[in-house]
């Protein structure tokens, strides 16, 4: 190509225009202590991510192997990616989901970068453990999230993980294949949390929250199909948001702040609870409500609470109600949580005035062990050998 005065003579070639403009920052529509980013993998994962979008989080995207399952997800089209393998979806085969995520690795990376921008604190990967796309692609997407966090210096040597996950467990009725898929993924994910194997590789995971669909069926009997999934997804998204929002507010006597929330988010496996109090005349009314709160969580119910090292307990009540409750009644509830947790545990406290009638107690427990009994159950249903393995 000829040069004219040292300048390259560029012909008039039509150039393609990039599909999307890279974003430096993305602004949420809700008040939060931490700026979270969410990616949903597969249909179930996309629905979970969509629930966070509906609350007001805006760093949200999703991937799937079929455009049909993506069509009903109510987030911007530019925040979606179809990992087309030419086979009409993963078909409950996690190997297909894994292949798709690895084939589209860089596309998923770019989707997350432009959907999240650079200004975020933690990535939460959402997936259905039993599905082909979500179950198969989940760990690869977790690795992509780690790569992004390392490149943006949100993770590094000596730093806690900046990647977490929300994963749903299948119902017994979903059959052998789905339960086998779930067992394989969950066994691997639980190996990424805690003080040992996950952090050695630098690919550790925190927090890890598990939605147990079998438990939802028992806690909310009679729900229609559409209401069933909506209840599950809305509940987990609302719990995450509640604590993230509360950490920005000034409490009445006790304040749960951003640093408190971070200790829970960094603790590994977490579970949430919420329960309205019907009465509070006696101190034992409070402690019973908290125990009931933990029993009625939509997350797996056989998590060993006595292993928990860190927790938060938040009371939110109408001002008139809070003015009528003796402080030692609330103290009794806090002490009860400390007794059922492990030695040297920490319970963060919060007391807030709310705009609704009555009194509600919210809890989050961290550094829990794997739900061994539930994992063994899905192993049996899935026909997976060696159910006595350690998780």
Image (tube, rainbow, N blue to C red):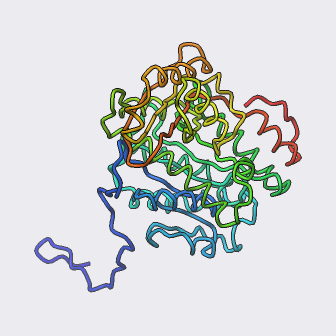
Could you say where residue 83 lies in the image, as x and y percent from the top left? Answer: 59, 67
Could you say where residue 49 lies in the image, as x and y percent from the top left? Answer: 52, 58
In depth, the one of 28 and 67 nearer the eye is: 28
In depth, the one of 389 and 170 nearer the eye is: 170
The residue most toward the top is 343
In depth, the one of 13 and 149 nearer the eye is: 149
Residue 77 to residue 310: above or below: below
The C terminus: image quadrant: top right
The N terminus: image quadrant: bottom left
Residue 305 to residue 135: above or below: above
The residue most toward the left is 5
Give the residue at x 58% y 55%. Answer: 233
The answer to whether residue 103 is left or right of residue 220 is left
Residue 232 to residue 17: above or below: above
Could you say where residue 153 lies in the image, as x and y percent from the top left? Answer: 36, 40
The answer to whether residue 312 is left or right of residue 20 is right
* Residue 266 visible (yes or no): yes
Residue 17 to residue 264: above or below: below
Give the residue at x 51% y 62%. Answer: 50
In depth, the one of 281 and 314 nearer the eye is: 281
* Residue 150 visible (yes or no): no
Could you say where residue 388 lies in the image, as x and y percent from the top left? Answer: 84, 30
Give the residue at x 52% y 33%. Answer: 202
Q: How many marks?
A: 0
Give the residue at x 14% y 71%. Answer: 6
């Amino acid at each position: 190509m000829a040069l004219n005065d040292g300048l390259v003579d560029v012909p008039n070639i039509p150039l393609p225009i990039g599909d999307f403009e890279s974003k430096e920052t993305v602004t949420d529509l809700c008040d939060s202590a931490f700026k979270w980013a969410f990616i949903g993998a597969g249909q179930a994962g996309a629905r979970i991510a969509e629930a966070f979008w509906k609350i007001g989080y805006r760093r949200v995207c999703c991937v799937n192997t079929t455009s049909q399952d993506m069509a009903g997800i109510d987030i911007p089209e530019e925040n979606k990616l179809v990992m087309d393998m030419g086979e009409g979806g993963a078909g409950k085969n996690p190997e297909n989901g894994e292949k798709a995520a690895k084939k589209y690795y860089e596309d998923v990376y770019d989707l997350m970068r432009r959907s999240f921008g650079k200004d975020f604190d933690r990535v939460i990967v959402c997936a259905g453990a039993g599905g082909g796309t979500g179950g198969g692609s989940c760990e690869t997407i977790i690795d992509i999230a780690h790569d992004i966090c390392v490149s943006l210096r949100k993770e590094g040597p000596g730093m806690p993980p900046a990647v977490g996950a929300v994963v749903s467990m299948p119902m017994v009725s979903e059959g052998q294949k789905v339960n086998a898929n779930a067992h394989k993924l969950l066994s691997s994910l639980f190996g990424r949390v805690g003080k040992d194997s996950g952090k050695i590789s630098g690919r550790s995971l925190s927090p890890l929250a598990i939605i147990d669909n079998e438990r939802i069926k028992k806690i909310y009997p009679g729900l229609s199909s559409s209401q069933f999934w909506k209840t599950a997804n809305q509940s987990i998204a609302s719990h995450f948001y509640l604590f993230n929002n509360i950490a920005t507010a000034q409490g009445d006597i006790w304040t749960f702040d951003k640093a408190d929330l971070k200790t829970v988010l960094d603790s590994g496996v977490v579970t949430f609870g919420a329960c309205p109090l019907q009465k509070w005349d006696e101190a034992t009314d409070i402690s019973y409500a908290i125990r009931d709160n933990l029993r009625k969580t939509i997350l797996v119910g056989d998590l060993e609470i006595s292993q928990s090292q860190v927790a938060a307990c938040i009371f939110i009540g109408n001002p008139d109600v809070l003015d009528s409750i003796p402080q030692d009644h609330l103290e009794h509830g806090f002490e009860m949580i400390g007794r059922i947790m492990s030695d040297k545990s920490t319970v963060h406290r919060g007391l807030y005035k709310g705009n609704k009638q009555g009194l509600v107690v919210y809890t989050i427990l961290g550094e829990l062990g794997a739900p061994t009994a539930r994992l063994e159950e899905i192993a049996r249903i899935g026909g997976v050998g060696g159910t006595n393995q350690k998780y």
